[in-house]
Amino acid sequence: MKMFYFIVLLLCFGFQIKAQENQTQTQLKLKQLIEKKAEYHKLTGGETDGYRIKIYFGIDREAAKLIKTKFSQKFNTIDSDIDYQQPNFVVLAGAFKSKLEATEQLKKIQIEFPQSFIIKGKIKAKS
């Protein structure tokens, strides 16, 4: 009977050592993935493919500023900025990883800005 308990104890000890080894390997893999992500962000400048919503484009800088201000007041949770793409000023809103996310926001935005549409572009990756 003592031999049985001894064998059970040895087996439990063996399983515990194996579990610790697996945990250590998992932590190493996680650390490697984090390092690869950091290296990728350095190479890409922290940008990744995504979607934005174009709410205005035209040659009038003041109109672009006015639209951006109006947008920011109405949709204060969505970032927007003015970009100059010669010869037009463009007001872009949001930074969405998926087209589904962008479409959901577009439906809300088009109520106030019916000319808005989704474009594919580079967005800042969230850490």
Image: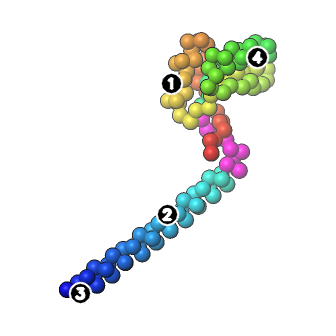
Identify the residue at horizontal 62%, vertical 52% (top origin). Answer: 37
Query: Which residue type carries mark 1?
Result: Glu
- For this view, does 91 lie left or right of residue 10? right
Distance between the alpha carbons at the discs numbered 1 and 4? 25 Å
Instruction: Identify the residue under disc 4.
Output: 65
Q: Answer with mark 4 or mark 2, whichever residue precedes in sequence.
A: 2
Q: Position of residue 27 (x, y in %)?
A: 53, 63
Query: Which residue type carries mark 2?
Result: Thr
Against 98, is 42 above or below? Answer: below
Q: Secondary structure at mark 1?
A: helix
Instruction: Identify the residue under disc 2.
Output: 26
Instruction: Identify the residue under disc 3.
Output: 2
* Residue segment shown in magenta: 41-50
- For this view, does 115 lie left or right of residue 19? right
Q: Quadrant of the N terminus?
A: bottom left
Q: Secondary structure at mark 4?
A: helix
Q: Secondary structure at mark 2?
A: helix
